[in-house]
């Protein structure tokens, strides 16, 4: 009996040792855990394009590869009200909305200094790669990204990089602890001392070789026969807003060497498919130079295709340019994925693709279809400020000539002077609340305003989708005191188009996934948000979610480990 007990005790002890050793030894990566996660944000890529242009997508393109072998969600919408570039990129990998992450716009007014703040400005750092007075960093982003959590969990051994023509896209997708974010300035790739002390050799090679110069004299022509295009409006018109040296009609030829200034030549490249080609060239250099996806610690690469946005602003969503740009983006991305197969290894990478926003139709084009489209619906914002000032003085009984009550009117927001004498009396709260309501009610009286909400209403919460979108966009220290929304198809500017509204055409964007850990052939129609990318990336990398994340991962698209 003692011998048997000793034998059982020995077997139990051995099993315990083996079990404990398995806990202590790092586990091998799961078969469906990617070595490299690539998040691509195609700036201003509307889900509408994947619907309208689908029959023309190449069988060799990235979109059909996703439809056949990956997963996609057909109802992906941004859930914050003001759909511009910086907020759109900030939500993707934080999983948090501007109300929490602090990125309420590309710029916002700082009521405390009286100055405008650019979303990624940082005067404490220096630019590397070119002479510049535009130092940037993620310091204005108030929360962490999935990349930050990944760095924390692996003690820095996972690598996180970003690349884009736009600084704000590259910086806000990667986060605070990224190894580096790169962007284009003065036609060369740059970063800042926030990330590292010098520009890496693989990008210096591109800069020294003047990589952008090869596009001099190249011509952007239609990829397909004209009859195959769905956008059939007049190619030559007076409502599009092409860059200097181009007309509204195809073909578009990039300036020859010496023909235009370096800036105007750069505009030609950025307002064409050549801008995405330049971006992917840098992305390949990063993957190779940093050996991304080459060890057991998953890496993250964030890429923004900024040129799609430039083309969309200039020519509009119903132009031949935007349609052709979409087909070329599809093929450029397909080439990059094939390259990842060869470089990182088929089955070892995962792609997630979305967009930071959509876009409104050009007003003049929309009017042809009898849509209620209007340019500059409120007119001059300085005039609006004057009218609001007069209304407030009248109803609050403030004498003319005193300090202004309205501090600023911009970007769908009205800022009041919190320290104005009328608000520092004993009845401060009542007077301040009354002032907000006076502004709100004046705005609601304007023909093209469909919603206006005061600060105290946003803070306490109210029902309805539009109010929820405004609440997600409102940050108490960075937003105005009254937020307002113009009616659909109201667009600022004299030509071209833009985005920034809570309406369907601005919020509806793609949500595509492909590669390791992704269910093949999955099509899902439940409502999701680009903010779901943060927790989804965390699940793929087997790490914790970002601390401010509020969205669940895209579980239907994730294969079980």
Image (spheres, rainbow, N blue to C red):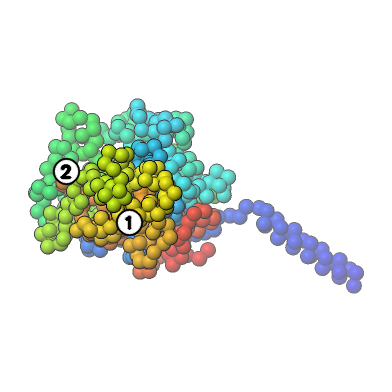
Q: Residues within 10 Å of mark 1 (few under 14, many from 20)?
A: many
Assign the N terminus to one quadrant of the image: bottom right
Instruction: Measure how far apart labels 2 and 1 are at the Cα level.
Output: 42 Å
Q: Position of residue 337 (x, y in %)?
A: 36, 52
Marks 2, 1: nearer the viewer: 1
Relative placement, left or right, of 316 versus 510 is left
Instruction: Residue 182: give x, y in percent of width and height.
Output: 39, 38
- Secondary structure of residue under mark 1: helix
- Residue 495 seen by the camera: yes
> Residue 245 occupies which quadrant of the picture?
top left
Residue drawn where x is 33% and y is 52% of the image:
435
Nearer to the camera, 485 or 95? 485
Does dot 2 land on a helix, a strand or a loop? loop
The x and y percentages for residue 433 are: 38, 54
First in sequence, mark 2 or 1: give its number. Answer: 2
Quadrant in the picture for residue 161: top left
Residue at the location (16% across, 30% down)? Answer: 259
- Give the side of residue 208 with respect to residue 243, left or right: right
Q: Position of residue 21 (x, y in %)?
A: 70, 55
Query: Quick check: marks 2 and 1 in contact, CB under 8 Å?
Result: no
Residue designated by label 2 = 242
Which numbered circle lies on residue 259? Answer: none
Residue assigned mark 1: 437
């Amino acid at each position: 009996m003692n011998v048997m007990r000793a034998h059982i005790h020995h077997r139990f002890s051995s099993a315990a040792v083996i079990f404990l050793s398995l806990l202590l030894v790092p586990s091998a990566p799961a078969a469906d855990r990617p070595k490299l996660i690539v998040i691509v944000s195609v700036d201003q890529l509307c889900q509408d394009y994947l619907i309208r242009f689908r029959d023309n997508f190449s069988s060799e393109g990235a979109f059909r590869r996703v439809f056949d072998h990956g997963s996609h969600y057909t109802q992906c919408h941004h859930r914050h009200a003001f759909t511009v570039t910086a907020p759109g990129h900030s939500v993707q990998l934080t999983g948090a909305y501007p109300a929490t992450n602090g990125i309420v716009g590309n710029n916002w007014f700082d009521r405390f200094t009286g100055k405008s703040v650019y979303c990624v400005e940082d005067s404490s750092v220096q630019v590397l790669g070119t002479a510049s007075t535009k130092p940037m960093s993620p310091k204005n982003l108030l929360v962490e990204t999935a990349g930050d959590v990944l760095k924390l969990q692996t003690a820095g051994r996972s690598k996180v990089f970003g690349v884009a023509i736009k600084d704000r896209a590259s910086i806000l997708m990667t986060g605070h602890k990224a190894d580096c974010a790169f962007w284009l300035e003065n036609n060369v790739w740059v970063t800042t001392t926030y990330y590292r002390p010098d520009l890496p050799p693989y990008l210096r090679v591109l800069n020294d070789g003047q990589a952008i110069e090869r596009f001099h004299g190249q011509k952007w022509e239609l990829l397909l026969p004209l009859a195959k295009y769905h956008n059939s409006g007049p190619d030559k018109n007076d409502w599009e807003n092409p860059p200097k040296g181009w007309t509204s009609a195809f073909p578009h030829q990039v300036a020859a060497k010496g023909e235009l200034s370096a800036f105007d030549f750069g505009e030609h490249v950025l307002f064409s498919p050549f801008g995405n080609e330049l971006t992917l060239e840098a992305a390949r250099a990063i993957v190779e130079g940093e050996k991304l996806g080459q060890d057991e610690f998953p890496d993250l690469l964030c890429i923004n295709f900024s040129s799609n946005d430039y083309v969309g602003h200039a020519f509009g969503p119903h132009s031949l340019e935007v349609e052709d740009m979409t087909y070329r983006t599809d093929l450029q991305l397909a080439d990059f994925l094939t390259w990842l197969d060869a470089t990182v290894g088929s089955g070892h990478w995962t792609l997630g693709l979305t967009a930071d926003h959509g876009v409104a139709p050009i007003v003049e084009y929309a009017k042809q279809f009898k849509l209620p489209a209007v340019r500059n619906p409120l007119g001059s914002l300085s005039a609006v400020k004057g009218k609001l000032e007069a209304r407030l003085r009248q109803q609050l009984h403030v004498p003319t000539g005193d300090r202004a009550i309205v501090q600023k009117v911009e970007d769908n927001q009205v800022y009041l002077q919190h320290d104005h004498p009328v608000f520092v009396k004993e009845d401060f709260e009542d007077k301040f609340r009354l002032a907000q309501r006076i502004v709100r009610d004046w705005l609601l009286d304007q023909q093209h305003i469909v919603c206006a909400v005061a600060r105290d209403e946003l803070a306490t919460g109210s029902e309805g989708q539009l109010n929820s979108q405004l609440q997600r966009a409102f940050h108490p220290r960075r937003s105005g005191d009254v937020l307002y929304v113009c009616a659909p198809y109201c667009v600022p500017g004299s030509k071209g188009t833009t985005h920034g509204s809570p309406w369907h055409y601005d919020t509806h964007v793609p949500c595509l996934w492909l590669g390791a850990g992704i269910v093949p052939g999955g099509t899902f129609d439940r409502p999701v948000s680009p903010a779901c990318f943060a927790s989804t990336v965390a699940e793929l990398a087997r790490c914790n979610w970002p601390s401010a994340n509020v969205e669940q991962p895209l579980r239907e698209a994730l294969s079980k480990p």
